[in-house]
Image (cartoon, helix red, strand yellow):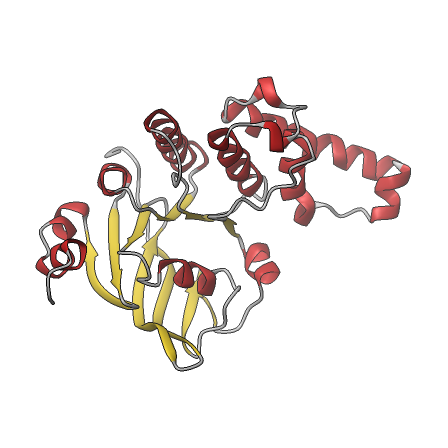
Amino acid sequence: MADRKIGDVILEVKNISLSFGGVKALTDISFDVREHEVRAIIGPNGAGKSSMLNCINGVYQPQQGSINFRGKTFSHMNSRQVAEMGIGRTFQNLALFKGMSVVDNIMTGRNMKMNSTILQQALQLGAARREEVAHRAVVENIIDFLEIQAYRKTPVGRLPYGLQKRVDLGRALAMEPQVLLLDEPMAGMNVEEKQDMCRFVLDVNDEFGTTIVLIEHDMGVVMDISDRVVVLDYGKKIGDGTPDEVRTNEDVISAYLGTTH
């Protein structure tokens, strides 16, 4: 991983606080993400990791703080606006269309890139047809990249879980995001599936140049593939640094081992 060129900060989370009713999910969280890096967010269950991703991609509106992406600061953006800016996302609970084929699921990730109207698409008018051919070429490249050619026409609901997660990754890649948020991409996988997904995450980072922000429970995975790690516990930041720095941080060790802070 040393040959990758990690660039300047492209995403900066500043003093984010989020509450639901009286319950604080996040308290004054700040960290940054550099271009081309793999940035992990870890922490015990209920630490606020998914809430943090939901703030970045516009699902939740934090009560305090702001997010700066490529020099633009926003505190209130919806998910579509965030996606149009170039931030993609996969979900912990697969939100795939189970009855649709692999190809068609990944094509839904191209919707934002389409200029023709639904009527033009339905009638297959010239420009719409050319556009569809171009989008399908992108999708076929992603299918090749993720090694799921054999399942192109298979309804996603019939695929094993590990392959469904791969399709979910493909759909996010179809948006051509500059930053990709991965919410527990390896949850529920066996060892072999995890190894495959690790390889794809690193390949996406390497070959597409995509910046990756991921939540992951498997500490071995995090320490292997991340450039930097931010650690949350009870909605507060308790650690931030390289895997080695985080691994030896007393607050992090106590949070994970359940000893008193």
Q: Residue at x 50, y 50 (%)?
A: 89
Q: Give coordinates of residue 131: x percent, y percent.
A: 76, 37
Q: Is residue 44 above or below residue 95?
A: below
Query: Which quarter of the figure has residue 224?
Result: top left
Check the picture and name the quadrant holding the N terminus: top left
Query: Image quarter for residue 235?
Result: bottom left
Tell me: 211 left or right of 111.
left
- Whether residue 8 is visible here, answered yes or no, is yes
Does 225 sit above or below residue 245? Answer: above
Nearer to us in this view, 177 or 126: 177
On the question of residue 16 being in view, the answer is no
Q: Which percent across, then down, holds residue 122?
A: 87, 40
Q: Which residue: 9% across, 51% down?
A: 248
253 to the left or right of 33: left
Q: Where is residue 52 in the image (x, y as percent from the top left)?
A: 39, 62
Instruction: Work out which quarter of the rendered image holds the C terminus and state it.
Output: bottom left
Question: Where residue 45 appears, x then y in whole percent?
Answer: 31, 57
Would residue 190 be found to the left or right of residue 83 on screen?
A: left
| Lateral position of residue 185 relative to residue 126, left or right | left
Q: How many labels does the image show?
A: 0
What residue is shown at x 82% (from left), y 39% (from top)? Answer: 128
> Farthest bottom residue?
22
